Image: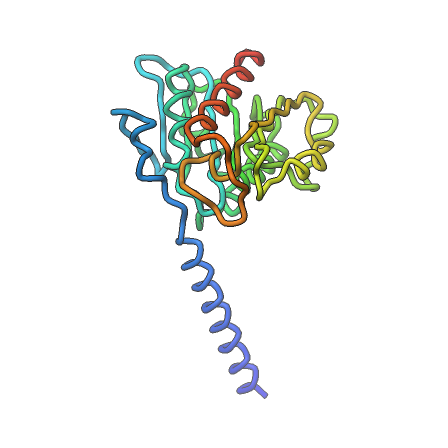
Amino acid sequence: MKKIIKYILIITSLLVFIGFSVFWIWSEQTYEASNNLSTFLGNDTMEYQQNWLVFEPENQQAKTGIILYPGAKVEPEAYSYYGDTLSKESYLVIIPQVLFNFAIFDQNIAQEIMDYFPNVVQWIIGGHSLGGVAAASFAFNNPTKLDGLILLGSYPTDNNNFTGMDLPMLSIYAKNDGLTTPKEIQETQHLLSQHAELQEIQGGNHAQFGIYGEQKGDGNATISVEEQQRRITDTIKQWLDDANL
């Protein structure tokens, strides 16, 4: 009997190891930033701190920080346009590398980031796709630590119902998004806070919330990635201005 139990434990451990190995290999097959990313950023260079991609304003201390969680299996660099552009508007922007390239497994990394930058007095968290789900989860569990939530082609889960909460929220979605569809955005709108704003990007799709090329299952964009990135960033800036952040 002891031998049977021993064999079962060995086989189970082996299966778990194989399963994890397969998942790890798959999770490392990421969406990298497009080769033409440099055309969007000009001569600006990327700075890394603590394995995070950090964009700081020049010659001044940022009052407000924005933490942006990447979409599933998307490299942080793919969201550099937001960091580069918003840092020029006096915001500190941090895009972290997350565990297994899935922010849902590393959603509390926002706390590490906030602790690392103690002089920042206001914090916004956001994320794209599954990264937005993780950001919403952190925001739901830590509402007093945050001043806003930004969802990019994303929405909260049923477990994170913000109804009745006064946390400012911005949900930006794309008309041609085939992965987080406008229908799904509308069907989950009731989960947003009483201070939520929704903005649709006409002609945009899911992958163009970042700069990493096409994504399987997505719709076809009728605007360029540069145009979609510009519209999204302008929308975020306007929302931040209106919220005095």
- Relative placement, left or right, of 139 versus 65 is right
> Residue 236 location in percent, x, y?
52, 21
Q: Residue 13: percent from the left, percent from the top?
A: 49, 72
Q: Residue 116, position in %: x, y?
A: 40, 29
* In-front residue for pair 130/224: 224
Q: Farthest front residue?
A: 222
Image: 51 above or below 73: above
Residue furthest to the left in view is: 43
Quadrant location of the N terminus in the rendered image? bottom right
* Residue 32 lies in quadrant: top left
Observer-nearest of 51 and 90: 90
- Residue at x-position 35% and y-position 22%: 56
Against 237, is 79 above or below? Answer: below
Residue drawn at (39%, 37%) of the image: 78
Q: Looking at the picture, tell me which residue is in the foreground, 205 or 90.
A: 205
**Residue 190: x percent and y percent?**
73, 32
**156 sits to left or right of 12:** right
Q: How many marks?
A: 0
Which residue is located at x 58 percent, y 31 percent?
A: 173
Residue closest to the eye, 20 or 200: 200
Structure colour scheme: rainbow
When the figure is inspected, residue 27 is found, relative to residue 13, above or below; the finding is above
Q: Residue at x 30, y 29 (%)?
A: 39
* Looking at the image, residue 200 lies above or below residue 24: above
